[in-house]
Image: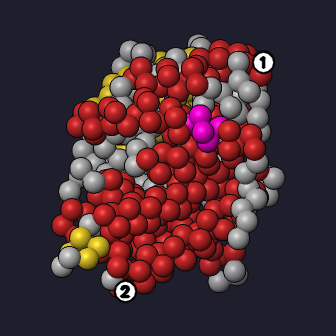
Amino acid sequence: MRRTVFNEDHEAFRETIRAFIAAEVVPVYDEWFAAGQAPRDFYLKLGELGIFGIEVDEEYGGAGIDSHKYEAVIYEETARAGVTFGGSGVHTLLGLPYIKMLATDEQKKRWLPKFATGEEMWALAMTEPGTGSDVAGMKTTAKLSEDGTHYVLNGAKTFITGGVHADRVIVCARTAAPREDDRRFGISLFAVDTKSEGYSVGRKLDKLGLHTSDTAELAFVDVKVPVEDLMGEENKGFGYLGTNLASERWGIAFGAYAQAAAAVRFAKEYVQDRTVFGKTVASFQNTKFELAACQAEVDAAQAVADRALEALDAGELTAAEAASAKLFCTEVAHRVIDRCLQLHGGYGFMNEYPIARLYADNRVNRIYGGTSEVMKSIIAKSMGL
């Protein structure tokens, strides 16, 4: 079936990204993997390439393109090469939408130029040690000072992707107690400068996968946040968080589809080269049937991911549709990558092979951005159940 989601400009961008990955990422990726993160100066290279500024308005140094399709190309090309761009994904997928939606003109002038160049990397801090999917249960507080010039931030966050290298973090905190009839009330968002006194990065977490992406614990002890760094209106943060969930879940869905497609490519190349009993593994009927079944699932996931992308760009992707896309694509990726690893035999268990890293990296897709169980609940609710 002919694919229509990308045009000539997207394909030209794809060639640029593919060449960049080959020159700047693949040769040093093993070093990143061992270190547990990409180096900070790599993000400046992404900024120079223009990746961070694609959706930033021209007046702030970006390209002003209102589309996620270039982002989708990056998902496909990094997966194809068996690499990632470290923790930079949250910078554009999570950070930018909140700036564009909530920032005042004054805030955009302060934040967006350095956002586009990679001089100032952003992350999002919602999850706390005792609260995962239950965002309304957060304990981190931000109290307005008596003179009204700043908030005093206290609390802790965990599982914060990009948290080690971040220069600013969008922190969700309680500025008021929840109401009896609305426990979501009282949450506000702040663009916290990580150089602030009392702000600290705790452990860089040792994860099962995504080893080149820095994920950290954060702590706030009497951190002074200027009132000028409040994002949007006070106490309305929960609603803002919900607004961006469709975009975030599309990103996870599309990334998962891209990983599944890459797994089939890795497995096909491996079985064509590997010999067993004097024959290539690819010559066995079981291999052919397994890869054919995997390709059929990838084709279906691509169709779902592309349709969600078109709906997202049109501003029409609903919460239930995003949940459905995430659930389907992440579950497909789980099945496909597992079967493709099996075709590698013992070598599939070795981290020197991209399929092994892909297997570990993929597992979190069914957890973050809302677990598969949460996605099912959202879909069921939309069905009137």
Inspect the image, locate mark 2, and give the three-letter code of the amino acid beneath it: Gln
Query: Is the residue 232 above or below the residue 187 in the image?
Result: above
Which circle's residue, 1 or 2, is located before the other in the chain? Answer: 1
Q: Position of residue 284 (x, y in %)?
A: 33, 83
Q: Nearer the viewer, residue 50 or 321?
A: 50
Specify the principal SS of the magenta part.
Answer: helix
* Residue type beneath disc 1: Glu
Q: Looking at the image, which residue sits at the far front?
A: 278
From this viewpoint, is residue 8 visible?
yes
Question: Which of the labelled discs sits on residue 305, or is there none?
Answer: none
Q: How crowded is the residue under tag 1: few (<14 C-alpha within 10 Å), some, or many (20+)?
A: few
| Numbered badge on residue 285 | 2
Residue 167 placed where, x, y %?
Answer: 47, 22
**Residue 302 position in % (x across, y down):** 61, 65
Helix, strand or loop under label 1? helix
Name which residue lies at 26% across and 77% down.
279
Q: Quadrant of residue 30?
A: top left
Apparent side of residue 204 relative to residue 110 in the rendered image (left or right): left
Q: Is residue 142 above or below residue 197?
A: below
**Residue sitting at 36 percent across and 26 percent down?**
39
Residue carrying label 1 = 59
Question: How many numbered discs, if any?
Answer: 2
Give how far apart the Cα atoms at labels 1 and 2 are.
Answer: 58 Å
Q: Is residue 57 magenta?
A: no
Give, as a single range, the part of the protein colored magenta. Answer: 13-17
